Amino acid sequence: MYDRGLATRLHELTAAFYDLEETRMFGGLAYMMNGHICFALWDDYLVIRIGSESANKLVDNDPHARPFDLAGKTMKGWVMIAADALGEDHDLQNYIDIAMIFTSTLPQKTAKQAPKKH
């Protein structure tokens, strides 16, 4: 489950970005860019994909940020942002901007083709 109010705010903030696709995933809400998850809502957190180096720096310097732990496994390059850091739209926008900048550097994912039958 995820915070529906935060989901509404995210939808409003990202509506102008044609390259983001909103989709339900793992009980949360994910925003895809170039076929990659860029950021997501999961439980009471905003989860952002920003790469390992940036993730380490953000966790070290932002008291609202922590490594994204999914079922006991830390996901490198991903950070969970606590809801209390997202009260203002400009704060929410700053976090999603960081994720969008990083994800835009990743190569476009293409759909996997089915193997050819001989």
Image: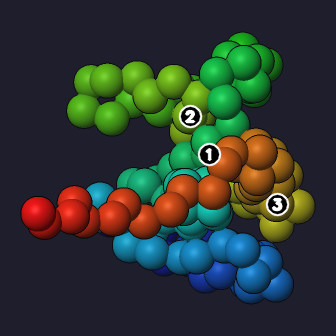
- Which residue of the protein is positioned furthest toward the front in this rendering? 118
Give the residue type at disc 3: Gln
Residue at horizontal 45 percent and vertical 75 percent from the top: 23
Q: Which mark is residue 93?
A: 3
Say which label, 2 or 1, has the lower sequence index: 1
Element assignment for label 1: strand
For disc 3, the neighbor class at 10 Å (few under 14, some 14 to 19, many from 20) is some
Residue 1 quadrant: bottom left
Q: Pointer 2: residues within 10 angstroms few (<14), some, or many (20+)?
A: many
Place of residue 60 in the rendered image (x, y in percent of width and height, measured from the top left): 72, 14
Q: Secondary structure at mark 2?
A: strand
The amino acid sitting under disc 1 is Ile
Residue 29, compared with residue 61, is above or below; it is: below
Residue that numbered label 2 is attached to: 78
Q: Is residue 24 left or right of residue 15?
A: left
Circle number at residue 48: 1
> Which residue type does callout 2 highlight?
Trp
Which is closer to the viewer, label 1 or label 3? 1
Residue 59 image offset from top left, x and y in percent: 67, 21
Q: Is residue 99 visible?
A: no
Which residue shows up at 42% across the image and 65% down it? Answer: 111
First in sequence: mark 3 or mark 2? 2
